[in-house]
Image (spheres, helix red, strand yellow):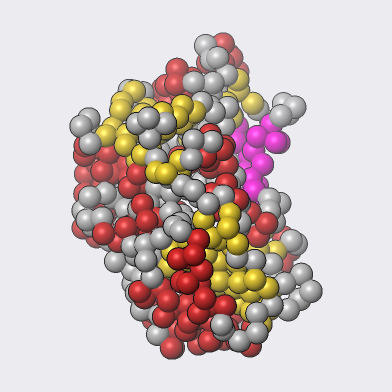
Amino acid sequence: MELIEAADLDDVVIQDFERGLQGRILREGDADYDVARRHYNALINKHPALIVQCAGVADVIDAVNFARTHRVLVAVRGGGHNVAGRALVDGGMVIDLTPMKGIRVDPVRRTIRAQGGVTWGEFDRETCVFGLATTGGLVSTTGIAGFTLGGGLGWLMRKYGLACDNLLSVDLVTADGDFMTAGDDEHPDLFWGMRGAGPNFGVATSLEFRLHPVGPMLAGRLVYPFAQAKEVFHVFHEITQSAPDELTATCGLRTLPDGAPVAAVTLCYDGPIDMGEAVVEPLRGVGQLIGDLVRPMTYLEVQSLVDPLYPPGLCQYWKSSFVQELSDEAIDTIIEHFAIVSSPLTVVILDQLGGAMGRVGADESAFGYREAAHDFLITSLWRDPMESERHILWTREYWDAMQPFSTGLTYVNYLDEGRPGSAAYGSAKYERLVALKNRYDPTNLFRMNVNIQPTA
């Protein structure tokens, strides 16, 4: 479908569209326009012609119909946290769900339905009052929709599966402007695709999740001198090889505010505190700890552990890949390349996978790859945009050096701009996703995502 600039549309056409909305349209020059187009990644500086702030499903249907009828390039914003800036679009139209904050918890059935503009911090606040939760984002300002529809790695994934594994149904508006509910019993083919590649098939107006009991858990961070990094990674690897599902941990490298590089293990043990202490004890015995911040916490506290590392307003560039085996050579490569890190704000993370998320059948959802033991993620952050070329080059060289240890696939929510969707799903799943795209969005109206290219 050949697209036009939304700015080229007649003002009368736009005014007629806005009169039918319960929400509002923001255009350049409006008082709230710059706030609405602002992205937490300072590298993203896009100028949509129209930002449609939807008040409800009717507004979303009208916005989708308007974009299709007038052939306008469209992006969808839930939390707007995708580091590549896929929630915004230059010259086109943003369907902005951020005003849609409705949440309904059913503590008896242990379910929740939340609208597409809800963030994980808002979601968790409502569930935790009932002692319930589901696998959510590691940064509390992340939106629930994009995170879940791309899979959803989080602190509870090894015990309860990915966010998408806990999804019961999705209400969405398709490219034809139709409202549908996708679940195991309704449009199961579409539901399969929504769990891993969802942004390709429609605008998720609300999501229904399964919830689980959560109580106090052992969580926090252990910090070590950089000189001990190799031993830390080895002990981390030994523990995670046989760890119970209650443990989810990451091992990473970062720089302290005083300029000292360090290794750190951040963890969450969702089970009896004393049993968690026994699992963590070998990590406490590594060398000379700089800091031991592991303690009993509520799930709400756990969900904001990582927030200070990713404040808004910094430039960010991420690259990631799944890693099957954490060999000595892989550990050496991780440490040697971080030793010449280009920015003191950069954080490198090795996620522990497996557990419940790895026991879900490979074909049960579109999520790309469940067999890997780890996800390796380079999150480069810096303040001065003039330094971007240097930091991006360092990140790419680091990622290239890690490719001999990669499975060849990347977690879709971390996939950087320019890489094809097949890099997240593999060829067999990608072909099935193309067939779904041909059925539900043959003109590729929803293309500002990790795109599945239709062939219809």
Q: Which residues are magenta?
A: 33-49
Q: Is residue 206 above or below residue 159?
A: above
Give the quarter of the figure containing the C terminus: top left
Label count reads 0
Q: Is residue 85 visible?
A: no
Assign the magenta stretch its main secondary structure.
loop
Q: What percent of the width, then of the height, locates residue 145?
A: 45, 40
Q: Nearer the viewer, residue 428 or 438?
A: 428
440 part of magenta stretch: no
46 part of magenta stretch: yes
**At 39% from the left edge and 43% from the top edge, which residue is drawn?**
212
Q: What percent of the width, then of the height, locates residue 163?
A: 40, 47
**At 70% from the left edge and 64% from the top edge, which residue is drawn?**
382
Give the quarter of the figure containing the N terminus: top left
Q: Quadrant of residue 241?
A: bottom left
Q: Is residue 171 left or right of residue 400?
A: left
Q: Is residue 222 visible?
A: yes
Q: Nearer the viewer, residue 177 or 293?
A: 293
**At 54% from the left edge and 86% from the top edge, which residue is drawn?**
230
Q: Is residue 109 above or below residue 412?
A: above
Q: Is residue 39 left or right of residue 196?
A: right
Q: What percent of the width, then of the height, locates residue 454?
A: 29, 44
Q: Is residue 150 above or below residue 100?
A: below
Q: What percent of the width, then of the height, locates residue 305?
A: 61, 56
Q: Is residue 348 left or right of residue 72?
A: right
Q: Is residue 309 above or below residue 6?
A: below
**At 65% from the left edge and 34% from the top edge, which residue is drawn?**
36
